[in-house]
Amino acid sequence: MQTLNYSFRYLLKRRGNTLARVLSLSLGVAVALLVFSYVGLNFSFNKFFPNKERVFQVWEQSPKIGGMAHKLVKPLAPNLVADIPQVEAAVHFIEVQKIFGTTDNLMEATALQTNSTLFDVLDFGVISGDPHRILSSEGKASGEIMISERLAKKMFGDEDPLGKKLGLDVVAGVFETPRVNQSIGDFDILEHLPYDEDNEIWTGQDSYTTFIKLCEKADIAEVEAAMPEFIRKHGIEEHCKEWQITYCFVPLTSTMFVANDVKQMQMIYSAIALVALIVACLNYVLLTISSLAERSRTIATMKCNGASRGTVFCMLLAETLLILLVSVAIAALLIATLHGEIFDLFGYKVSDLFALERIWIPLLVCVVAFAVAGIVPAVIFSAVSIDYAFRRGGDNRAWWKKSLLFLQVTMAVAVVIFLLVSNRQVSYIMNSDYGYKFDRLMALELSTEIKNAGVIADKLRSLPFVENAGMSSSSPLSGYSGMPCVDEEGNLLFSCRWDIVDENYIPSMQMRIVQGRNFLPTDGADKVIVNETYVEMRGWKDSPIGKIIYDSSMVPFEIVGVVADYRMMSRGVALPILLHTVPYLSDLAPEYRVVVLYNILMKDIDKENVKALDEAIASVYDGYYKYKIIPYSEWIDITFAPVKRMRNGMVVVASIVLLIAFIGLSGYLQGEMARRRKEIAVRKVCGASTSEVLVVLGARLLWIVLPAVVCGVAIAVWLNEEWLSTLAQMRCSVPVWIYIAGVLAVMAFVYAVQLLLSWRAANENPVEMIKRNN
């Protein structure tokens, strides 16, 4: 208690030093708590499911489709259960968007279309209702759905939601709101997914996520061994051989990390958090050691009065504990205050990041911070000898302080360069050539009868503020469906992406035709347009216009045009693309419903035009589907949100690291000025000018800064390569000037602080300085 009392009184006495230590430790601990909790949450995915060790996700692996794919064919799940005795249950589902409500108050919710065995395989909690019936064909016939507890509360408050109408559906059950740390998705509605076992399609429509649950004591190796016979039985042996397809079964708790970049991103985030925590702790150590010369006599006096080395050690630990407790409290207050900004940065609520089942993560961060920040000063101070103290502690443990400053500068250089690269990458993504222009583009998705699709498009084009409006079945941002590209003999060449568009699609998207022509209203179903990558992968050196190509059913199509490559989906990869025209759907009845994406090129996007657009659509649409109009720019922002989060997170971390480094550098230089006052005075007495004194001080600092810069650049190179490797083809180049700029920025910052703090000492009266040092 006496040592704790002494520590408390000393902290109050040296308020400036105490405040600096509290501030730096608070910031570092806050960053570490947030980032390590975020990483811990990601590593906890799917671990709460019952019988998780018996559940596996089915993946399809093929070099011809670009690696691993989790969107599989619909017949796979039910037939795995029927044919392989080790499989107890299987489920498949597809995610769709449902919009309901009035025109003035539209609401959108994500729904899973699935089968009745969902909770047998992935039991995330049923509150009311019978999912086996609701998610069956019987429930579908009655228009029944299940909704989440979250949506029930939002729509119906404290009322019982069962039997209530939600759009055209009836609520028949409620399930627990899906947790954030599961890979099924974030959804609020469950409804039956129709399946016709007499009309199974095994070589197309691969859009369904599939999970299986093994029988007790069954081994997944038995299922894998049964797959060759399963493939032969369903007549897809040749298809799998041609496409080099193999089915993989990934444990439920590992499926989050099938994509290689997920673990890489967690490593990068962990490295960033570790940097912030280490810099903060080392800064604390640096500021604590800077007071050694002042406190050494006090410690020596305590030892003369019987204090042991252990007593001094405990006193310094108690001091660190007091500061850490205050720092953690400030960090917690900061996190609670900035909960909205934290959600924008990480995509999770603060309550999710610090859930009770993972509370050990922030506790571990605090223990590590206490160990690093407390033990080093405690060892140094407890080792102070009486004779060292009374000869004024001349060396002041300078090598310790220089080492700590070296590490701080190293971390600062690495973080600043990584910040510059991440900012350049985000700018590159947002401003690069997509192959189409989206600044005046609006997206409208409708489920409509084929006969009415063109009527709606004509209405849109007739509006005075609409420049053009083209129809498609998909968007480059959401991705196109896949199909095989074959030669004249039907041999598989590669996989391409395809879409159905009208003659106004390419002009509306402001794409470029580089060879041939666009579609004409008079074109039949046998006309197609391909992109440059398709032509390149076919190996054609002459013009492709007029060439005949075939689909997997050997139906011929004539190429009438080549469109310039445009980027697909969030990674920006240019894929081979095949565009069909609307008559491709001529075999379907006019009353058949299809989902159409209207790509509307506006003359000017403002609230009045968007409102008028909405009214025009309502005047010609049957209201079957509750729609929403969204600007493409907003869609792109959503698509690239993870990359932006990384950039924004780096801005925050870099700012905090630099602030901590400023505090540490200030403490170091103040200690150096106090230690070298006599030397500076002697130099000035001997005729040295202020500038010469400053040059000498700067040169000594350079011996620390230059090696630190080299190490910081090496760390930055590693971090940049790890991150950019996750961005496939849509990655920017990193010129040398980025590294030079980062190095110069940190060095300018270091020397600006050095100049600020040494200017006064360099200009002070040398006689007065010598008097104060004696």
Image (cartoon, rainbow, N blue to C red):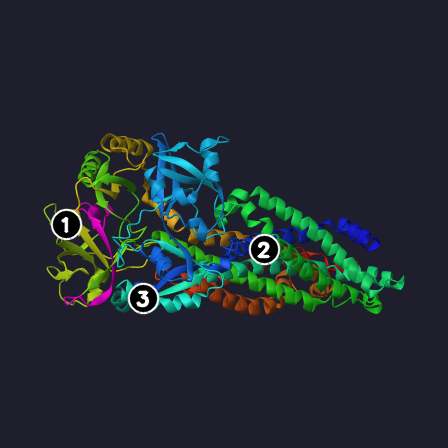
**Mark nearer the viewer, 1 or 3:** 3
Label 2 SS: helix
Image position of 498 with respect to 608: above or below: below
Residue that carries the numbered disc 3 in the rendered image: 245
For marks 1 and 3, give the CA distance.
Answer: 35 Å
- Asked whether residue 517 appears in the rendered view, the answer is yes
Instruction: Name the spot of residue 394 as percent of width and height, x first.
Output: 76, 67
Residue that carries the numbered disc 1 in the rendered image: 519
Q: Is residue 484 left or right of residue 254?
A: left
For marks 2 and 3, give the CA distance.
Answer: 43 Å
Label 3 SS: loop
Which residue lies at the image location 56% right of the left edge and 68% below the top edge? 706
Q: Is residue 628 left or right of residue 6?
A: left
Q: How many marks?
A: 3
Of the pair 531 and 82, the residue shown nearer to us? 82
The disc at residue 32 is 2
For label 3, the crowd category at 10 Å Cα-Cα, with few meaning under 14, some 14 to 19 and many 20 or more, is: some
Instruction: Name the spot of residue 376 as percent of width and height, x first.
Output: 71, 64
Instruction: Name the spot of residue 282 as percent of width and height, x first.
Output: 65, 61
Specify which label sits upstream in the sequence, 2 or 3. 2
Magenta part of the chain: 487-511
Which residue lies at the image location 58% right of the left edge and 66% below the top edge? 705
